[in-house]
Image: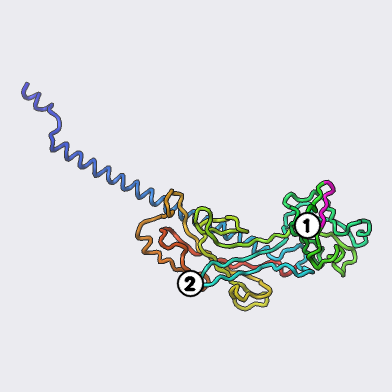
Amino acid sequence: MITKYRYSRGFSLTELLVAMVIGLLLLGGLVTLMVNSKKNYSQQDYSARLQENARFAMQFLTYDIRMAGYFGCSNNIINNSVAAITPTESASGAPDSITITYGEPYDPGSEISLNPSAYSPYSTPNTLFLNNTVPSTWKDGDTLVVGDCGSNSIADIAASGINLATNSVVLDLSNTSAGNLGRIYDPNSTTGGPITVRRLVSNVYTIANGQSGIPTLMRNNQELVEGIENLQLLYQSLSGGGFVTGASPPSNIAAVQLAALVRSVSNENLSDREYGSGADITQDKGQYTLLGTNVSSDTPTIRGQRRVFNSTLMVRNHSL
């Protein structure tokens, strides 16, 4: 009986303590592994979002810059009231801005086929009768590009100028030098040819804080892509030469260089949207060079990844 009791008495206190220490060491290693895995996942997620935001910003700017000056099959504006690209240069490394203007290429049903002699039946010669329905994006007061392959005229839609019943648009030419619609025809044309009518697109790109307080790429004062801290732009003339700033841009811009400083953005509910460890602040001095311009990050004390993205874009519509 004594021998049987001795072999069934269980663990000693020392054995139990040793087992607990080993279990705590294993649990601590597992927790450390999970924390590091979560941090690595967050870093990769923020890096992916940074690159995605940069890609979106570059995509919007690239499309508009390449479309600058597109007004149909001719870029000749007879009333000379529209610039394809209007730079705005900011001082002391602050973000630049740019205004890009072109005719909307996807307006449906905007072609009308008339010749100069066809104006006489109309009591109001400044009325356009479209082949199809007036595009839903057009509004009273919008600016239109009206022209053939010889020249274009810029004119506003008159107040209450859209008539959906007749698919017609009345133009207000009081503030232009276009005269009546007969002046938009190519004077060398023998057939008259079709007239195209497009809505004039004018997009202004700036950098400003969005509603969340994060620096954001804005288009016409509307938030477009967050995390864009700075934008620098240079311009090259059609005649060649080097790229210059928007302070003295060439009269005929053929190419645009742009550089964007992009910051990672966290989804976490933190007051400063911070990311990373204290070492990241030490590594990020908040100073970057964008196309030869030294700029400071918007808030260098906010921890996060930052990268500079560059691109050179050609303006494609000089040959029209």
Q: Dividing the picture into quarters, in which one does residue 27 lie?
A: top left
Question: Which residue is at a point 46% across and 61% down the rendered structure image?
Answer: 306
Q: Which mark is residue 294?
A: 2
User: Colour scheme of this structure image?
Assistant: rainbow
Question: Which residue is at a point 68% across and 61% down the rendered structure image?
Answer: 202
Question: Which residue is at a point 74% across and 68% down the rendered structure image?
Answer: 81
Mark 2, secondary structure of its residue: strand
Amino acid type shown at disc 1: Ile
Q: Position of residue 311 (x, y in %)?
A: 57, 66
Q: Position of residue 257 (x, y in %)?
A: 58, 69
Give the magenta range. Answer: 165-170
> To which residue does mark 1 refer?
157
The verdict on residue 268 being magenta is no
For this view, does 109 lie left or right of residue 100?
A: right
Q: Position of residue 105 (x, y in %)?
A: 72, 57
Q: CA distance from mark 1 to mark 2?
A: 45 Å
Q: Residues within 10 Å of mark 1 (few under 14, many from 20)?
A: many
Task: Choose between 26 and 107: the one closer to the eye.
Answer: 107
Amino acid type shown at disc 2: Asn
Earlier residue among tags 1 and 2: 1
Question: Which residue is at a point 74% across and 54% down the rendered structure image?
Answer: 107
For this view, does 43 lie left or right of residue 135?
A: left
